[in-house]
Amino acid sequence: GWSGGSSASGGSSGYSAYTRPEAPPSLAEAGGAYKAYFAPLPAGEAPAALPESAQDIPPLGYALAQLKGIYILAENAHGL
């Protein structure tokens, strides 16, 4: 019959005890990380200058969205 989980040789059944995974960070910890990530830029840095004329705009335009380096949406002198 059934011997209650022990093997015939007297060893364990091969199962290990369940270990609970680590708890996710608390809401306060996660909020602090987002505050640091979305903090405003320092006032001393100037934004990039816009092109003087349409000839300075790259022919394929500026990327508005990319996925692994591939343009998904771009804007040029003629629009999107």
Image: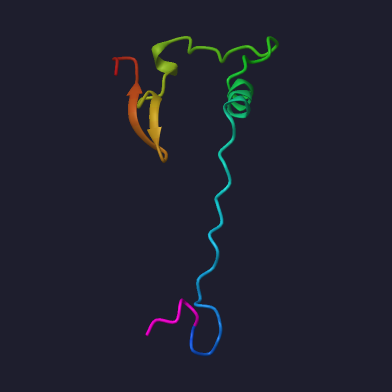
Measuring from the top left, give residue 71's x and y in whole percent: 36, 33
**Going 70% across and 11% down the picture, which residue do you hit?**
44
Snapshot quadrant of residue 10: bottom right
Query: What kind of colouring is applied to the model shown?
Result: rainbow
Q: Is residue 3 magenta?
A: yes
**Going 44% across and 82% down the picture, which residue do you hit?**
3
| Horizontal arrangement in the rendering, residue 54 relative to residue 21 (left or right) | left
Measuring from the top left, give residue 27's x and y in whole percent: 57, 27
Viewer-side residue, 17 vs 42:
17
Viewer-side residue, 33 vs 9:
9
User: Is the magenta region chiefly helix, strand or loop?
Assistant: loop
**Going 62% across and 17% down the picture, which residue do you hit?**
39
Q: Is residue 2 magenta?
A: yes
From what the image shows, is residue 29 above or below residue 50?
below
From what the image shows, is residue 71 above or below residue 11?
above
Which quadrant, please, contains the N terminus?
A: bottom left
Q: Which residues are magenta?
A: 1-6
| Horizontal arrangement in the rendering, residue 56 relative to residue 71 (left or right) | right
| Horizontal arrangement in the rendering, residue 57 relative to residue 79 (left or right) | right
Query: Which residue appears farthest toward the right when viewing the image?
Result: 44
